[in-house]
Image: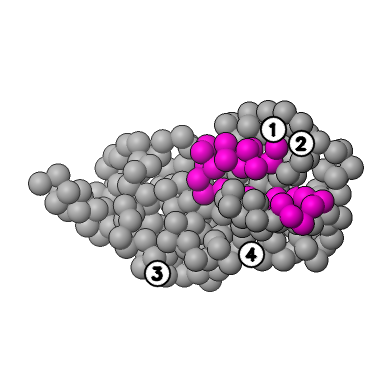
Amino acid sequence: MKTLIVDDEKLALSRLKRLLNDEKITDIVECNNPIEAIKEAAKSRFDIAFLDISMPQMDGLELANTLLQINPNIFIIFQTAYEEHALKAFSSGGIDYLLKPISNETVKKSLQKVFKYAKKENDKKIIAKRGNKIYLINIEDIYYIKADLDEVIIRIKEADAYLRKKIGDMEELLKDKNFFRIHRSYIVNIDKIKSMQSVEQSKLEISFEGIDDVVTSSKDGAKEFRQSLEKRSL
């Protein structure tokens, strides 16, 4: 779960980073001013942003508005020393606010709220893991899904992430999306395909835009996929 933390106080940044690390959130970018934060948000897609409200140049409420314009799906959590800012925090698109001094308990509760909201949007996002890292994945960012015993491997540009589901469950979840099961072990995102070529036994070898991976269909999967593509072109 890629996280942005913004505070003009270095000690506050260090403390929040340590508390997030305690909750296994390790993919963190720190910024000590809003301008730097906007530049980082333009370069990378963040899942969560922890924003101090009182900062020079631009306050956290204004910064939240800019970050939401860049990425409407980002979860905003504010930090403030003043309880009266809470109403403004929620009206500015925040899902929670932390009253300073923050603690392990308050950080944990905010993260639980993120997961709760994420589950409500499970048609848009999938939560998967790799080691201690948690990824909040947009469905359109998936290249392909591979069966792996009682889990699936979800291939996104940044990594392979693991989810404890059967590939049949994923096929059902994605049935109304632009995905196709080309093999008992593979589901591919049609929108991510760069090229296809026939290989032995009329199977298809599929390459993707932006990654070097190649996935091979089964013979029956290739036949069904070709028929599906033909129907789409009619």
Within 10 Å of disc 1 (Cα), the crowding (few <14, some 14-19, many 20+) is few
Disc sitting over residue 55 in the figure: 2
Residue 227 horizontal side relative to residue 78, left or right: left
Residue wearing tag 1 = 58
Disc sitting over residue 168 in the figure: 3
**In this rendering, the label closer to the viewer, 3 or 2:** 2
For the residues labelled 2 and 1, say whether their Cβ atoms are less than 8 Å apart. Answer: yes
Q: Position of residue 234 (x, y in %)?
A: 10, 46
Q: Disc 2 marks which amino acid?
A: Met
Q: Position of residue 221 (x, y in %)?
A: 28, 57
Residue 161 to residue 109: above or below: above
Q: Disc 4 marks which amino acid?
A: Lys
Q: Which residues are magenta?
A: 59-85
Disc sitting over residue 69 in the figure: none
For the residues labelled 4 and 2, say whether their Cβ atoms are less than 8 Å apart. Answer: no
**In this rendering, the label closer to the viewer, 4 or 2:** 2
Q: Position of residue 233 (x, y in %)?
A: 14, 44
Q: Earlier in the sequence, mark 4 or mark 1?
A: 1
Residue 153 to residue 165: above or below: above
SS category of the residue bearing label 4 = helix
